[in-house]
């Protein structure tokens, strides 16, 4: 029995159409990835920013929410809801166009919701009790890529706690990819100013 047959048997669908197969696979795979990633996030091992570079997008948004909307968690939630709502709508209306539209709207709404949730989590990590100046001189990693003359996010230890904070490169022409090592040079408001970390030079100094 294939995965498609197994899923079809669970949802009670016999001889599924191509669109029904698409909805079922989106629901199954989306749910699996969403649950795994959310479990990892709750354990503190957040990998969404790492996978942002895999799902690279040239869309430009000015808010910090942009970095979370296209995270792997958001994409998994969108895929999951597209599948579930699409299946339900197709079963209720027997109209493929309505099913695709409803699934698409549900996917977009869930992606936005997950983005808001992750932004809220990041806000809790970087609460008002933290002094951003304490991050100056600390070393960390890029969490969401920093494009030339734009803000991104980094993960850096401040007062013994790993924080996810907004950052910009000192050199406005630099592109810092997710996972790159950085050093915090300064802070302007709640935005950290960083530079790439030369691992070889750091090793020699130590």
Image (cartoon, rainbow, N blue to C red):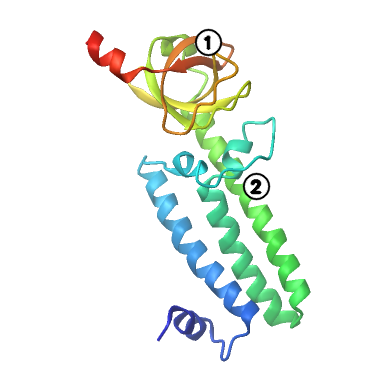
Taking 88 as reference, is 44 above or below it? above
| Disc 1: CA contacts within 10 A as few (<14), some (14-19) or many (>=20) | some
Q: Is residue 111 left or right of residue 185?
A: right
Residue located 54% across and 47% down the image: 55
Q: Using a 10 Å C-alpha cutoff, classify the residue at mark 2 as few (fewer than 14 neighbours), some (14 to 19) or many (20 or more).
A: many
Determine if residue 157 is in view: no
Q: Earlier in the sequence, mark 1 or mark 2?
A: 2
Q: Residue furthest bottom?
A: 14
Snapshot quadrant of residue 59: top right
Numbered mark located on residue 187 in the image: 1
Q: Residue at x 58, y 91 (%)?
A: 15
Q: Which residue is mark 2?
A: 112
Expressed as whole percent of the image width and height from the top left, the position of residue 187 reads 53, 10
Kindly tell me whether residue 147 is visible in this rendering: yes
From the viewer's perspective, tell me whether residue 155 is left or right of residue 12: left
Q: Nearer the viewer, residue 202 or 101?
A: 202
Q: Could you tell me residue 3's position as x and y percent?
A: 44, 78
Residue at x 51% of width, y 36% of height: 121
Which numbered tag is attached to residue 162? none
């Amino acid at each position: 029995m294939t995965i498609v047959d197994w899923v079809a048997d669970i949802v009670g669908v016999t001889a599924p159409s191509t669109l029904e197969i698409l909805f079922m696979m989106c629901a199954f795979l989306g749910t699996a990835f969403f649950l795994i990633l959310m479990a990892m996030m709750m354990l503190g091992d957040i990998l969404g920013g790492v996978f942002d570079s895999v799902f690279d997008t040239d869309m430009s948004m000015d808010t910090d929410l942009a970095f979370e909307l296209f995270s792997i968690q958001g994409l998994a939630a969108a895929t999951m809801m597209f599948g579930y709502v699409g299946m339900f709508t197709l079963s209720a209306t027997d109209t493929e166009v309505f099913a695709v539209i409803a699934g698409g709207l549900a996917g977009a709404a869930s992606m936005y919701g997950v983005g808001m949730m992750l932004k809220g989590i990041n806000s809790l990590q970087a609460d008002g009790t933290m002094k951003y100046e304490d991050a100056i001189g600390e070393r960390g990693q890029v969490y969401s890529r920093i494009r030339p003359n734009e803000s991104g996010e980094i993960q850096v230890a401040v007062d013994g706690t790993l924080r996810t904070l907004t950052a910009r490169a000192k050199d406005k022409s630099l592109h810092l990819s997710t996972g790159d090592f950085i050093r915090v040079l300064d802070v302007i408001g709640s935005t950290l100013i960083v530079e790439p970390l030369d691992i070889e030079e750091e090793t020699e100094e130590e």
